Amino acid sequence: MLNRRHILLGSAATVGALSVPAVLRAQSGPIRIGLITTLSGPGQVYGQYIKDGAELSVARINSEGGVNGQQIELVVRDDKNSPDSALAAYRELTGSGIKLIAQGTFTANVLATLPLLKDDGVTSLVVGSSALSVTHENFTPNMFRLGYSAPMCFGGYGHLMAERFPEINKWALVRSDVQALADITNYFASGLVKKAEADGRKLELQEPILVPYNGADFRNQISQVSNSGADGLFNCLQGADAISYYKQARSFQLDKRFKLLCDSANELTVAKALGKNMLESTWSWTAWYPQAMKDNPSSDALHKAYTELRNDPYPNWYVGVSHDCIATIAEGIKATQSIEAADLIPAIENLSFQGATGNVTFRKEDHAFAGDLTYIRFGRSDTTETGWEVFETVHMAGAEFLEPATPGQKL
Amino acid sequence: MLFTLINSLTLGMAVFLVAAGLTLIFGIMRILNFAHGAFFMLGAYLTSTMVQDMPGSVWILIGTALVAGVIVGLFGLAVQHFVLSKLDGIDEHFMLIATYAVMLMTVGGIKSVWGLEFHSVDPPPGLDLGVDIFGTFVPSFSLFIICAGGVVFLILDYVIHRSWAGKLAVAIARDNWTTNLMGVNGPLGTKIVVAASFALAGLAGGLLLPNQTLSPALGDTFLLMAFITIVIGGLGNIRGAFVAALIIAVIDGLNTYFLPSFPGVIIYVGMVACLLLWPNGILGESRL
């Protein structure tokens, strides 16, 4: 029979349970992290990399005993490369009590969920979304962007090229006719010009030559750029467009017409597809090139695990960045013993740890990634089985190339 | 300018190769086949499996593309048997939905078998560089595509308009019931045309393979232009598709030459203009 003593005991137990940190309350089950990414439709190939990286990160953390003794469970949902589906997946995950989300690939899908994070008390790590608005006019303190910030990556890229190749003064630019790639081209050009001007040089940058997105034939534009008279060429096309462009450019011997070729961000995807018909030499930005990071145990372990999983020793950079998204959440929980956004956000703001992609750290004001930058030069090789090899790797600190922080306002 | 025109001709013939099968199946069965791009892609993947990284010669490329075409044609027969024949006589909108479903299934199957990664197949030796024509550099593979498109058009035009089989197909398309009464096996004729339409998609995929990147999105690249082609040319009209493919390609080339800041936009303006001038297509809608 229920008496006054039972009621008092019950009340005390309830108050006690509510007063301990959230993570302890959930100790009976694993820490659940939602992953929203593109697993069907255009962009699926990148979503698969993101899923692989996140799953390998969870497997590694769990095999090392979990976070503060708790295992992590990854709950994966497909955004179908549509903001509506991303939002539906987000509502489903948060409706089931999940407060930790990793999300990518494309900006439009990320923007669909951003306004809800704060009210829902969700902490979100974003991979692959390059648009400035994510850390500016659409900024929310509950989101951190990892790995990819266009001004930093491509401003730094332009700076590096101007620094390494002062003899290249005339540049041609080729890009697909989409806004994200226009931004990337502009940041690269801006990085080039700033560095050249700082060194007292004046560069000639030609108007970008535009090619249709998801196009079938690029020969008119290839002919145009071949006759441009420039010494340096920056190609800003993505995925299949980039590979078809390089294939069709082969008969024009594009790599012999320019002293310096720069691909924006297709990194080894181009070399893996073109094989022995790879360009003689080109540069590319990448967020992760594990072969040059053998002294980084986290990178090395992820590389081995991925190679085992996919039988592919050259993983895409998305694998490394999505791995680090989960690692960042885990490091934050370790530091604060909580999964609540109010505790986790300041903890992540103050984090600085070695992830698979290098130093992981964020700018406090707008949560933009402020870690390391990596650039690789690779090309055709007669001495390797693949028909290509990476000739050199350059690591740079990224923070100095970040745009000014204006959280909540347009830059 | 000469280069732009030659390149326009290349693109036109590439688009015609894809559009030929699309217009053929519309001509006889009134089906706007949404799955056509997926079967074009299947032809490309099948050819890549046969030739690996590079076909040993032009003839090996043509031979493997033909084999891929035959295999895709057999897939077409299966689609006809299990899907299209069941929807015969009902509203055309259901056909659209059915072929869309077939497209999703085909793309899903391709992803399962060949994966999501990008692949590339090189042109065969002799087609990987270029030649000089009146002082203008022209890639050899462009000339190959132009020849391939021209030959496919001539064969199709002869078969449809001159041969006994083509005349039979036209009869079936115009009045299946009466043709049946006269002892012609209409359903068999329909099956042959559907298989030929799918086979053309597979053949186009194989022939254009060294020009494109293999990825599960390959079908989308050409499908939209193929649809524009058959609309401008006149639905179901093979000669119309040929003329329209050339017009579209020339418009695209002039677009690149005179308005390089707006790539691919003028095609749509051209399509609107053509439809205003010829609402039923340049050579008129036709049942073959």
Image (cartoon, coloured by chain):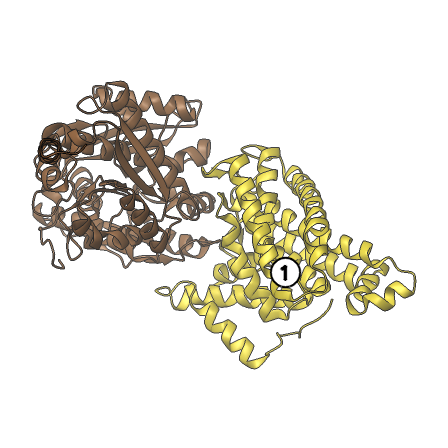
Q: Position of residue A200 (x, y in %)?
A: 8, 48
What amino acid is found at the position of numbered circle 1 in the picture? Met
Please give the name of the residue rendered at 9% of the width and 45% of the height, measured from the top-left corner. Answer: A199
Q: Position of residue A398 (x, y in %)?
A: 14, 39
Please give the name of the residue rendered at 37% of the width and 64% of the height, measured from the top-left corner. Answer: B260
Q: Nearer the viewer, residue A347 or A391?
A: A347
Residue A71 located left or right of residue A274: left
The brown chain is A
Residue A269 located left or right of residue A233: right
Residue carrying label 1: B95
In this orientation, does residue A169 appear?
no
Please give the name of the residue rendered at 56% of the width and 46% of the height, measured from the top-left corner. Answer: B105
SS of the residue under disc 1 = helix
Chain of the residue under label 1: B
Please give the name of the residue rendered at 33% of the width and 54% of the height, measured from the top-left corner. Answer: A83
The extreme front residue here reads: A1
The yellow chain is B
